[in-house]
Image: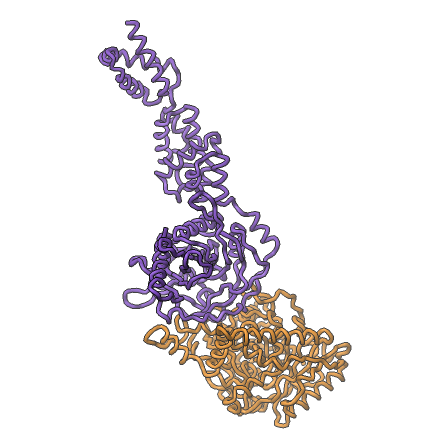
Chain colours: A purple, B orange
């Protein structure tokens, strides 16, 4: 419940997400598209906006955008048009951004968002279009502005949602769902810290039951999922306060100040833009071939919601576990690869991943970490066929984490195989009983809890390799024998 | 006529001349007369002689050389040249040295051409008289008190004065053809997309097209062949096969079977008597050569100037946004960012460039876009359709290039509308994306050259060149030189 809900107001939220595409090269030139390089290293005359340069469209960016469109059920338009959007800023080298305006690549579609009750809600989209990113300005302590144009020309898709979200939490769920999808598709790393997944929020409020929209404000500078939710909640409450005081909301762009926990209006000059859009004359109309459209649809991987449902229905995992495993495509892929090595115990493989592996290896590193999925599946199989006990398995797992390889080899090399030979275990039990007459006497006096001592001693003597159930059963028998047959 | 470029090429191949000799001769003529003409913004004498010496040495070694090997040419200062100053005729780029060559420059170099230097022009190719150059007007070799036309005025004047054997210009609304006509040389605006625009400073991206200027049709054909063709760096360049061997067109060919359209709309009032007489004589000559002259109609031609000045200025206002003083060119300090932009652009851009940026900004503004830019785009479609319809029935259209011969410098500077009308016959080609060629067709009573325009079907430059060559062979107007050339070395 947000503050707005509590007072009989309804919050209406529409999000615009800018998502960088992880293409090899930039959108209109051959510069590498990568993060974290020294300033202005990844630039050329084209992305620097030198005189005389012309853009040439990178079709990989089109393919990536089409994949997102296919995943979200958008309509892909056989012809779309780039346009120029004009404003002056030092990190915008040409004085205009090449974007799409009245004829975008994709329209319609929806983002499937999980509701709290387990149902899935389709949040409708207005459009998705391709555009180039601007560079990055940093204002330093000496009042100078430093411009890094590595980011200039990096491909973006702008995903414009309908004003169909109603709570900050739902907005957060929507963003997480969208981020999971672009990551699943492999078209973006969806990294908010590095700015490859950014969000602006349009917020308005209205009396519950009203059908027309209130005046909206646009909030920028939202850099974390939590920040998005806090900013929306703040802004909605601000609108309600204004309206309840008989004032009106001014349509404007506001910046979120995360440290202060509030939004503030931008100065009029900063937002008074007439972008003077017109069709980009340097680029022909973007034509989509039937082959491209087919490839986008056929190349689509199983998306998180479908995979989650399959894990629950076919593998009988709990919805919670299925949700954890499918949050990242790499993790779900890891699970399925491990399961392939031991298909009979999905729950066991799942538990080992969620409680043991994720406790030791960050989710993002699992695919490249020391424990190969086939080895983890094998480890669970070795527990299930009683080659090792669960306790020994944790030792084996430590060795696997240390990079020692497959569990069979570790067990063999370190002699960790579980002893299930009844004769051998019985011999060990008899030896322990013979070595501890005092404890045997206590047992006979009725202190049956002393049995635990014998179990411990047997396990110690066998270095944990004896099957604990067998040890228990045998001790029950042998201790009783001794009592009746002195 | 073969032409000085083709003749020089043959003499080089036969070993009768060296490129160093030809280059020295050009440099000497520049030295002798350019103080009066002002056709050049930068002459790279040392670089040109070094290129020429290298070509001569390679020829002496028997290496395979390109089709323009050793031929000295000039470039309008709108083409980016690695390590050579490129100003676009504007203060805002004074001192700018680009890090790369335009595609056409690279192609000329690969063909072996010797680059003499960079030629004067109206700033950012905006003008019809060369008086909008920040570095002084160009004077017409046929009358030094006259304009050479614009915006490729430096290139046309340099070719006319014998400073170079050919030049590359650009044509957005007539900027190759009109100065070619006013200076008595041949100029070709190729089909939009035929010659790469990569590395050519943009004025109006949907209209701009680079092309050659030279003394004769065959010389123009040789340059055209060397620089045309698709370019992976220009998404608007077209992958249409280029006819080869154009400059080897047969001598004195007749025009039997060629249908030429004559649009009444281009022969109405406003045409100077001298231009009207020379053009009529040219039509008669074409008929005598065997061509069939047919009346055609271009009913929307009268919307051309208005549509052109909306589309061209709108695109220019966008293309010139990058000249902000941040990364290159001249920068003027300001109290804040907006003041720096304002001061830089105010000091860097001349009056005409500012006028067009303001016109274009207005035409694209919220609330005006539909009335101006969209309407102009629609008019443009109608103009294009007129040409397509006419060219369904004829092989080419014949018109005057300019309503007047070279006017006096200063005569129209205070009347931009009169200046804009200098392009009334040439802008249709650009709006329609079609090829257009200007070939000398006589002189007016003051002894100033008159040009004849041929407009062809898309990618059919070959027909224009063939008809023009035939006409040229029959008339010999190209053989006349301005008096100033007589005194030159």
Against A161, is B102 above or below?
Answer: below
Q: Residue at x 76, y 80 (%)?
A: B292
Q: Does residue B68 sit above or below A47 in this rendering?
A: below
Which residue is at 51% across, 55% downward?
A65
**Which picture quadrant has residue A429?**
top left
Spot occupied by residue B344 in the image (x, y as percentages of width and height): 39, 77
Task: State whether residue A250 is above or below residue A344.
Answer: below
Q: Give the image location of residue A430, x and y in percent.
A: 31, 12
Q: Residue furthest top?
A: A485
Which residue is farthest left?
A: A438
Residue lying at 40% horizontally and 63% vertically, measured from the top left:
A217
Residue at the extreme bottom: B445
Please give left or right for residue A431 compared with residue B157 in the image.
left
| Residue at x 70%, y 86% (from the top left corner) | B282
**Nearer to me, A28 or B476:** A28
Residue B14 can be seen in this image: no
Front position in the image: B357 or B234: B357
Q: Quadrant of residue B420?
A: bottom right
Label count reads 0
Residue A72 in percent (x, y) is at 51, 51
Question: Is A239 left, or right, of B261 in this rendering?
Answer: left
Q: Where's residue A129, x and y in %?
A: 50, 59
Quarter of the picture holding the C terminus of chain A: top left
Name the residue nearer the viewer: A28 or A66.
A66
Q: Is residue A417 visible?
A: yes
């Amino acid at each position: 419940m947000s503050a707005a809900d509590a007072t009989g107001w309804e919050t209406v939220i529409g999000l615009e997400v800018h998502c960088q595409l992880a293409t090899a090269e930039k959108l209109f030139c051959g510069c590498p598209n990568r993060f974290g390089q020294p300033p202005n290293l990844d630039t050329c005359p084209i992305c620097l906006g030198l005189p005389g340069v012309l853009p040439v469209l990178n079709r990989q960016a089109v393919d990536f955008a089409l994949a997102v469109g296919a995943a979200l059920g958008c309509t892909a338009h056989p012809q779309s048009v780039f346009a120029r959007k004009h404003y002056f800023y030092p990190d915008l080298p040409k004085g205009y951004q090449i974007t799409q305006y009245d004829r975008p690549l994709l329209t319609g579609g929806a983002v499937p968002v999980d509701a709290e009750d387990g149902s899935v809600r389709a949040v409708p989209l207005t459009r998705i279009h391709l555009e180039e990113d601007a560079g990055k300005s940093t204002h330093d302590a000496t009042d100078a502005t430093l411009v890094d144009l590595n980011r200039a020309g990096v491909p973006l898709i702008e995903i414009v949602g309908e004003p169909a979200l109603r709570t900050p939490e739902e907005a957060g769920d929507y963003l997480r769902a969208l981020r999971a999808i672009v990551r699943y598709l492999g078209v973006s790393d969806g990294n908010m810290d590095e700015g490859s997944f950014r969000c602006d929020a349009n917020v308005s409020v209205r009396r519950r039951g009203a059908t027309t929209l209130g005046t909206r404000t646009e909030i920028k500078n939202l850099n974390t999922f939590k920040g998005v939710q806090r900013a929306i909640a703040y802004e909605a409450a601000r609108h309600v306060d204004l309206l309840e005081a008989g004032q009106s909301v001014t349509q404007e762009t506001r910046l979120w100040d995360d440290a202060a926990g509030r939004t503030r209006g931008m100065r009029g000059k900063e937002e008074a833009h007439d972008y003077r859009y017109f069709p980009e004359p340097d680029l022909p109309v973007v034509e989509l071939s039937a082959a491209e459209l087919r490839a986008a649809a056929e190349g689509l991987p199983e998306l998180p919601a479908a995979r989650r449902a399959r894990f629950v229905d076919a593998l009988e995992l709990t919805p919670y576990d299925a949700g954890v495993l499918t949050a990242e495509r790499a993790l779900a892929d890891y699970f399925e690869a491990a399961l392939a090595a031991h298909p009979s115990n999905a729950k066991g493989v799942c538990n080992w991943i969620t409680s043991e592996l994720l406790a030791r290896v960050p989710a993002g590193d699992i695919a490249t970490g020391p424990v190969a999925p086939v080895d983890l599946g094998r480890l669970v199989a070795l527990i299930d066929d009683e080659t090792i006990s669960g306790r020994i398995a944790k030792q084996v797992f430590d060795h696997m984490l240390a990079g020692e390889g497959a569990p069979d080899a570790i067990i063999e090399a370190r002699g960790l195989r579980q002893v299930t030979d009844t004769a051998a275990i019985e011999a060990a039990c008899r030896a322990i009983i013979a070595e501890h007459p005092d404890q045997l006497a206590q047992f006979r006096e009725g202190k049956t809890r002393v049995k635990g001592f014998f179990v411990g001693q047997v396990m110690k003597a066998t270095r944990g390799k004896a099957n604990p159930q067998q040890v228990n059963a045998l001790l029950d028998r042998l201790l009783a024998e001794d009592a009746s047959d002195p | 006529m073969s032409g000085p470029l083709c003749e020089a090429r043959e003499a080089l191949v036969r070993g009768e001349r060296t490129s160093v000799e030809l280059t020295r001769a050009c440099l000497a003529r520049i030295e002798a007369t350019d103080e009066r003409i002002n056709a050049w913004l930068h002459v790279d004498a040392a670089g040109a002689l070094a290129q020429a010496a290298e070509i001569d040495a390679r020829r002496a070694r028997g290496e395979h050389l390109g089709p323009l090997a050793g031929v000295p040419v000039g470039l309008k200062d709108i083409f980016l040249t690695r390590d050579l100053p490129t100003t676009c005729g504007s203060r805002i780029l004074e001192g700018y040295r680009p890090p790369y060559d335009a595609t056409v420059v690279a192609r000329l170099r690969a063909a072996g051409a010797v680059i003499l230097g960079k030629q004067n022009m109206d700033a950012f190719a905006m003008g019809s008289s060369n008086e909008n150059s920040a570095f002084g007007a160009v004077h017409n070799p046929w009358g030094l008190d006259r304009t050479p036309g614009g915006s490729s005025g430096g290139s046309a004047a340099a070719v006319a004065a014998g400073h170079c054997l050919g030049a590359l210009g650009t044509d957005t609304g007539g900027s190759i053809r009109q100065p070619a006509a006013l200076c008595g040389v041949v100029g070709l605006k190729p089909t939009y997309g035929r010659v790469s625009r990569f590395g050519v400073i943009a004025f109006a991206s949907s209209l701009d097209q680079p092309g050659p200027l030279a003394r004769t049709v065959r010389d123009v054909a040789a340059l055209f062949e060397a620089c045309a063709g698709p370019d992976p760096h220009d998404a608007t360049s077209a992958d249409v096969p280029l006819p080869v061997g154009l400059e080897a067109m047969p001598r004195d060919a007749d025009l039997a079977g060629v249908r030429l359209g004559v649009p009444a709309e281009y022969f109405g009032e406003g045409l100077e008597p001298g231009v009207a007489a020379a053009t009529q004589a040219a039509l008669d000559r074409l008929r005598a050569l065997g061509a069939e002259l047919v009346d055609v109609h271009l009913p929307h031609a009268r919307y051309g100037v208005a549509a052109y000045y909306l589309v061209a200025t709108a695109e220019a206002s966008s293309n010139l946004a990058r000249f902000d003083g941040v990364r290159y060119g001249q920068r003027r300090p300001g109290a804040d960012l907006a003041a720096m932009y304002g001061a830089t652009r105010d000091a860097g851009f001349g009056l005409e460039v500012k006028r067009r940026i303001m016109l274009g900004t207005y035409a694209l503004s919220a609330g005006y876009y539909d009335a101006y830019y969209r309407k102009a785009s629609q008019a443009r479609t109608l103009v294009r359709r007129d040409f397509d319809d006419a060219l369904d029935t004829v092989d080419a259209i014949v018109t005057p290039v300019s309503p007047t011969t070279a006017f006096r410098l200063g005569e129209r500077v205070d009347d931009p509308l009169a200046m804009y009308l200098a392009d009334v016959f040439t802008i249709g080609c650009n709006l329609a994306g079609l090829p257009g060629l200007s070939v000398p067709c006589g002189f007016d009573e003051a002894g100033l050259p008159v040009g004849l325009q041929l407009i062809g079907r898309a990618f059919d430059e070959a027909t224009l060149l063939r008809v023009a060559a035939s006409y040229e062979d029959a008339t010999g107007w190209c053989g006349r030189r301005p008096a100033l050339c007589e005194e030159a070395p």
